[in-house]
Amino acid sequence: MVRGEYLDGRSTRIRQVQVMLEGDQLSWRGDGVQGAALLVQVNVSARMTGVPFTLRLPHGAQLQIDYDDMPADWFRGRNRIESLVDWLERKRWAALASVLAIGLGLIGWLEYGMPWMADRVAARMPQRMDVAMGQQTLVLMRGRMLLPSQVPAERQAHLQALFDRFSRNVAGLPAVHLAIYDSPSIGANAFALPDGTVVFTDAILKALPDDRSFLAVAAHELGHLAHHHQMREVMRHVGSTLMISLAFGDVTSLSGVSAALPTFLLNNHYSRAFEADADDFAFKTLAQQSVDPIAFADAMHALEQAHPGEAGGGEVRYMSNHPLTEERIEKAQAASHQFQLGRH
Ligand SMILES: [Zn+2]
């Protein structure tokens, strides 16, 4: 028998009672009240050192028992959180398994969920958003990283015509156009912006041996545009919170995306899978327009010569990554072989 305080749940009056536990029945008596309840109907608060226990009884009444007065064997494991903790302590493997499951879930989300969502959001982006982002990036880069080209006007016009004729015959492209800039900081490089601008630097034009290898690099960049690689890659980087708000039409978050784009262009590069996609796109479209895909291998060789061991930004770093470049050249050679077979 222990001392307790009884509150009926209707008045604020506190009655001093004696509390007893017999079998599965709890009873109380004193100060004008008495009653009993089955143990299963009593809800007990968690054990916290020094804090009185609150026993919620049926019909809204409650009993309070001082922490020190509560017999240790009463209500053992009756509180839900306590029993969960108790259960976890007894079954360490279960606790470990849950931690592991949460970890795997997180990895799964980052590995598959995020890219999946990034692609969905990128696909839902209206075209004018791509255009705005591409132009904003150009404005940011022009005058700093992109300077007026030194390539003679005649040669520029020749390349423009070549580019236009080639891209007109490629299916599934947004509106695209060629832009040539002098860029000592970017070096021999080419990249595509989401508004359809394909930038070639003076240095890459100097490094590429002929028109076919120029078209090969252009075709690769058109592949990035056709597959919306840039927006998809940026979406993978901006994080899920931003993507969720964009998915629900909160356009104010867009400034975050446009801010991420130039940074992405300079510091990141496309995933290996996207590069391989763009390469395949190039092999296919070159062959369709009767250009031997070996031109792509020629371009890669020439760019390797132009960047001996240099670790630049964007595509350059990728191109000077030797084992990967070898792999891409081999694929171009295989595509060329197929092309030759098709011609005979
Ligand atoms: Zn690329």
Image: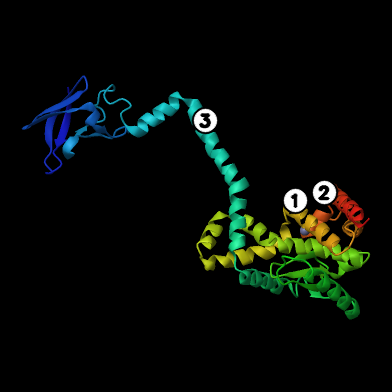
Left or right of residue 181, residue 49 in this image: left
**Mark 1: few, some, or many residues within 10 Å (few <14, many ≥20)?**
few
313 and 226: which is toward the camera: 226
The answer to whether one can see residue 293 in this image is yes
Counting from the top left corner in percent of width and height, residue 300 is at 88, 57
Left or right of residue 324, residue 45 in this image: left
Mark 2–mark 1 CB contact (< 8 Å): yes
Counting from the top left corner in percent of width and height, residue 43 is at 25, 33
Q: Which residue is pictured at 70% across the width and 74% down the height?
A: 139
Q: Nearer the viewer, mark 3 or mark 1?
A: 1
**Quadrant where ligand 1 appears:** bottom right
Amino acid on which the number 2 mark rests in the picture: Leu
* Residue 271 drawn above or below residue 25: below
Q: Which residue is mark 3?
A: 96
The answer to whether one can see residue 312 in this image is no
Instruction: Estimate the spatial distance between the alpha carbons at disc 2 and disc 1, rounded to whole Å.
Output: 9 Å
Q: Which residue is mark 1?
A: 272
Q: Nearer the viewer, mark 3 or mark 2?
A: 2
Q: Which residue is mark 2?
A: 324
Q: Which residue is pictured at 46% across the width and 25% down the height?
A: 91
Amino acid on which the number 3 mark rests in the picture: Leu
* Residue 75 drawn above or below residue 157: above
Indicate the secondary structure of the residue bearing disc 1.
helix
Counting from the top left corner in percent of width and height, residue 263 is at 68, 62
